[in-house]
Image: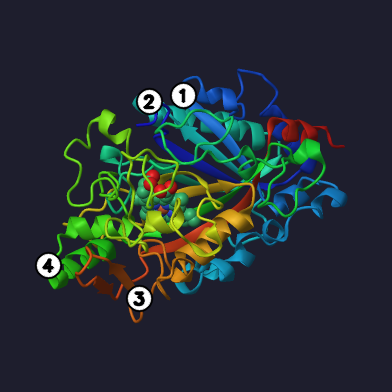
Amino acid sequence: MHTYRPCALRTFVLKVQNARAARQFLGGLVSGDASSPQLATADQWREAHAYRVNLGITYDGLAALALPESSLRTFPDEFVGGSVAAAARIGDAADSAPEKWQEPFARRDVHLLIFLFITDKANAANSIETVSARLRALYGGTGACEELTVCDAGSLPGDVAHFGYRDGFAQPTIEGGPPPAIPDILPHASASEFLLGYENLTTDSVPEPPELCRNGSYAAFRILEQDCHAFETFLAQQSAQTQLDPELIAAKLCGRWRSGAPLTLFPNADDPQHEDPGSFARYNSFDYVKTDRYSPHDDYDDSRGYLCPIGSHIRRMNPRHSKVAGNSGLSHRIVRRGLPYGPPYDAANPHDGIERGLLGLFIGASLKNQFEFLMKHWANDGGFAGIGQTKDPILGDNSPADSKFVIPLEAGKKPVALRGLPRFIRTRGAAYCFVPSVTALRYLSALS
Ligand code: HEM
C-alpha cells in the first residue's frame, strides 16, 4: 500500500526535568548531525528511511521548557486546557473519562511525546531498541527529561487493524505536500488546514512568535482500546436477527469492507481483487453524491445512503460532497497516523485479559475545528446529516439502551435498524500536542 508504511511505533512520554537541558535535547534533534536521531522532515517522505522521529509538545510542556509567558498566552484555549479539559466535550466520559486513563495521561506533567516510527520491517525489533537507546541517552543521560512511560504499537499480520479492517486508505491530499500514497479525486486540502501560520479560515488563533509557530501543527494523540469480542459478538447477533451477512454488516458500519474496498464502489460484495495493489489504488477515488466535478462515468449518487449508510464511520468522518449542515463536508479534514497495539484478537480465546487497540494521531491546524469537531458533531451527533440522535457505530459514545444504526436498503425496501450497540472503543489515554517545525526547535533551543 504505502511505500514507507511504518510497521512499529514507540511513543516516549516525557516530563521535562531541566528546562535548559531539555531545550538543548530538542535542538539536537534538528542539529543536522546524521550520527544522532533527527526529527523527520518533509524530505524523508521522498526517500526510504529505516525510522522516523516526530515530536509533540503539550501546553504544559511548552511552559516547562520556559517558553515566555507572552508566547504561552497566544495559544488557543483547547490546547491550553489539553485533552483532560476536552474530555467532556468529545465524549470521553464514564469508562473513557480521564480518571480511568492509564498513568500518566491525566496528569499535567506529560510534557513531551516522541513518536518513533519504524519502517524497516525486516529489522523492526532491533531498530526500535537501537534508536530507543540513542534517544534515551540524549534525554535521560543529560538529566533533561524523565521518561514517564512508553507505549508500543505494531502492525498486525495481514496489515489489518483490530476489528479486522485494513486501514490507511483515505488521507487528504494536501496542496504542495507529498503525492498521496493512494490517489483521490476530492479537491486538494489547502496546506493551511494542516500547517500554522498561513491564512486559514478554520484557525481562530495562530500563536506567536512566527519562528515558533509557522509550519507547526497540532495533533490529538489517543490511546483507544478496542473491544474486539463485543464487536464480533454484535456482528453475529445482528446477523442472526436481520439475516444480513456479518461481513456486510461490518462493511455497513464502517463504509468499507474489511478488505478496505469502499461500499460506494463495491456495494453488494467485496472486491474479489482486493489483494491486488492495482485494485486498491482506486479505494479512495469515490464520492457520495453527484457533483459537476466528475465525468459522466463517475456517477456517484448515494445521497440516501443505499450504498454506504450516511451514519457509517467513514461517511461521518469525511462526508465528502454529501449534503450536511453548514455545507461543510470538506472543511474538517484530518490527517491520521497510527498503529494497533496488543496481539491479534483470537475468537477461540476471547477473554484473554490482554488490552488491544489503536495508538492514533489525529493531525490538523485546529484541534477545535478538526479533531474536536469530528468527535463532537460528526461522531456523536447525527443531526448534521439529518439522521437524528445517532452516533458513529464504531467510534461513538454509544450505549446499548438507546443506540441505533440504520442501514438504508434500496428504494421501496424498509431500512434495517440495528439496535443495542455498545461502546466498542474506550479512551485509555490522550494528549493534545503542538507539533513543532525544525525552525521552532531551533528557536526553542536558542532561548536563554
Ligand atoms: C480505534 C478507533 C478507530 C477505528 C477502529 C477506526 C477505523 C477506521 C477504518 C477501518 C477506516 C477506513 C480506512 C480508511 O478509510 O482509510 C477509518 C477511516 C477514517 N477514520 Fe477512523 N477509526 C478509529 C478512530 C478514529 C478517530 C478517533 C477519528 C477522528 C476523530 C477517525 C477518523 C477517520 C477518518 C477521517 C477516516 C477517513 C474517512 C475518509 O476520508 O473516507 N477515526 N477509520
**In this rendering, the label closer to the viewer, 1 or 4:** 4
Q: Amino acid at mark 2?
A: Asn
**Residue beneath label 4, please?**
243
Nearest the camera: 89 or 51? 89
- Disc 2 Cβ-to-ligand 1 distance below 8 Å: no
CB atoms of marks 2 and 1 within 8 Å:
yes
Residue 196, image x, y percentages: 69, 42
Q: Quadrant of residue 241?
A: bottom left
Identify the secondary structure beneath mark 1. Answer: loop
Gap in Å between the C-alphas at discs 4 and 3?
Answer: 20 Å
Identify the secondary structure beneath mark 3. Answer: loop
Q: Which numbered tag is attached to residue 50?
A: 1
Nearest the camera: 354 or 181? 181
Crowd around label 1: few <14 · some 14–19 · many ≥20 (10 Å):
some
In the displayed structure image, the side of residue 52 where residue 141 appears, left or right = right
Q: Amino acid at mark 3?
A: Ser
Residue 143, image x, y percentages: 71, 39
Residue depicted at 39% across the width and 31% down the height: 2
**In this rendering, the label closer to the viewer, 2 or 4:** 4
Q: Quadrant of residue 356?
A: bottom left
Q: Which numbered tag is attached to residue 123?
A: 2
- Whichever of labels 3 and 1 marks the residue nearer the N terminus, that label is 1
Q: Quadrant of residue 168?
A: top left
**In this rendering, the label closer to the viewer, 3 or 2:** 3
Identify the secondary structure beneath mark 2. Answer: helix
Gap in Å between the C-alphas at discs 2 and 4?
Answer: 46 Å
**Residue beneath label 3, please?**
403
Q: Amino acid at mark 4?
A: Gln
